């Protein structure tokens, strides 16, 4: 089986490193030891965090279609007097 390795890590070590880095836990038990490895880690972290944040944003947008602030404003408008703008008690 042919494998291309940059740091000489096994695939499980590489996966472990990826999860630890992208979850920002950073135990420090696996670290790149070369300049090329450090540069790869920097690029990997920036791209990986961007993808992770985009995914979280997508989940939040799907979970709150009107947005969290938009939902609060709509509730306040439904409970307010249209003439005075004061919030009325719905009880």
Image: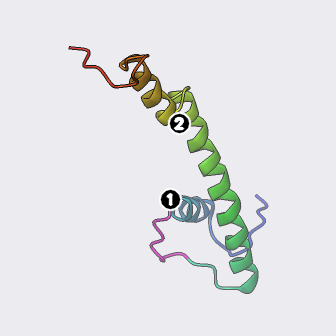
In this view of the protein, which residue sits in the foreground, 12 or 47?
A: 47
Q: Secondary structure at mark 1?
A: loop
Magenta stretch: dominant secondary structure? loop
Kindly identify which residue carries mark 1.
Answer: 23
| Above-or-below relation of 17 to 91 | below
Q: Mark 1, residues whose alpha carbon is within 10 Å: few (<14), some, or many (≥20)?
A: few
Q: Is residue 25 magenta?
A: yes
Q: Which residue is at 26% across, 15% downward?
A: 90
Please tell me which residue is depicted at 61% across the width and 37% down the height of the picture.
58
Segment colored magenta: 23-30
Q: Disc 2 to disc 1, how far (Cα)?
A: 18 Å
Numbered tag placed on residue 11 in the rendering: none
Residue in view at x 46 percent, y 23 percent: 74
Q: Residues within 10 Å of mark 2 (few under 14, many from 20)?
A: few
Q: Using the image, determine if residue 38 lies above or below residue 47.
A: below
Q: Quadrant of the N terminus?
A: bottom right
Q: Is residue 29 left or right of residue 55?
A: left
* Residue 91 within the segment the image draws in magenta: no
Q: Residue furthest top?
A: 91
Q: Position of residue 39 (x, y in %)?
A: 73, 77
> In the rendered image of this protein, does residue 56 appear above or below residue 59?
below
Mark sitting on residue 60? 2
**Looking at the image, is mark 2 or mark 1 nearer the viewer?**
2
């Amino acid at each position: 089986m042919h494998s291309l390795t940059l740091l000489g890590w096994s695939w499980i070590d590489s996966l472990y490193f990826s999860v630890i880095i992208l979850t920002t836990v950073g135990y420090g038990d696996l670290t790149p030891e070369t300049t090329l490895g450090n540069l790869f880690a920097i690029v990997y972290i920036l791209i990986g965090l961007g993808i992770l944040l985009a995914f979280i944003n997508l989940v939040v947008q799907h979970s709150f279609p009107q947005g969290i602030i938009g939902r609060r404003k709509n509730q306040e408008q439904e409970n307010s007097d249209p003439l005075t703008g004061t919030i009325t008690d719905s009880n």
